[in-house]
Image (tube, rainbow, N blue to C red):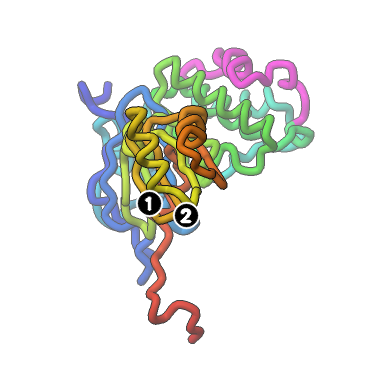
Amino acid sequence: MSAQGAVPIEVRGLVKEYGQLRAVDGVDITINEGDVYGYLGPNGAGKTTSLRMMLGLITPTAGTVRLFGRNPIETVRALEGVAGFVEAPTFYPYLSGRKNLDLLAAYDGDGASGRIDEALETVELADRAKDRVGGYSHGMRQRLGIAGALLRRPKLLLLDEPATGLDPAGMRDMRLLIRRLADHGMTVVLSSHLLAEIAQTVDDVVIVAKGRLVSQSSLADLAGRKKPGVWVRTPQAEALRQALGAKGIAAEVQTPDTLVAFEATTEATGIAAAGAGVVIFEMTTQHFDLEEFFLELTTPTLNPTTEGVSR
């Protein structure tokens, strides 16, 4: 049994060095039970390296990882109730999906073979189970990888870029599958750079850049930091602010020709503008944008004195 009350993942001071390169630099993360977490970062941010350490595939240079209270480097029992894949799952292409799962189940033991049908049903591959994997689409192979992970009856599932390379329908199917697993009490951690998909899938986001943790928060908390409203471009921004204020709508002039009306609709803003004779050139709904937030945290700011200078 895992330690009573232990969280699925607790990472403290995690470091991984390859010679002079510090791929992961002192990361602290806590993953609580039952949510879907997006583990985000630019290419080279240390996401895959961190996942490998969490699964005990590589040893940290410093720091600790605990899965339900256990260190995967110290005991293989730390991986009880834990499954997933790093990078793309691989299978024997000349064997059927079921036969590949038979081989995985034989390796896992613990009655895994009796869970194959259920796993195939869960990932919606039961009708293709007898087909050779070489004929599967990329999305089907990704789902077969999850089916293989489900044979272990995991409480924690770690997936590295599960939606990469999928077409829109495949992304939708993967999103629905992950949410279905979470709804049944599984904790899921997704490493990904597909921010639009992540925003529709996860409950919480962890963002890393240059090997360091830069943010961990629930998506709801992040969205709450930016009040919904309407952004307006008009040459009469101050006149529109006053007109909105007369109708009880708070607004802020950002530049002489732009304004944000807080907790307003485009309809109400347009009515106020028309009543005051204000001309509107452009008007859009403002809302929290995960991609915008991600880029703010992970895009380096260029030094204006050196920008554009080649060396």
Which amino acid, mark 1?
Answer: Gln
Q: Residue furthest bottom?
A: 311
Residue 42 tag number: 2
Please, what secondary structure does the residue beneath circle 2 have? loop
Residue 212 tag number: none
Where 10 sits versus 259, above or below? above
Q: Residue furthest left?
A: 4
> Which picture quadrant has residue 15?
bottom left
Magenta range is 110-132
Q: Position of residue 56 (x, y in %)?
A: 38, 43
Q: Position of residue 266 (x, y in %)?
A: 50, 32
Residue 254 tag number: 1
Where 130 sits versus 71, above or below? above
Mark yes or no: residue 86 visible: no
Residues at marks 2 and 1, CA–CA distance in whole angstroms: 30 Å
Q: Residue at left 40%, top 44%?
A: 239
Where 298 sits versus 81, above or below? below
Q: Residue at left 48%, top 32%?
A: 275
Which amino acid, mark 2?
Answer: Pro
Answer whether residue 111 is magenta in the image: yes
Name the side, left or right, on which 114 lies relative to 298. Answer: right
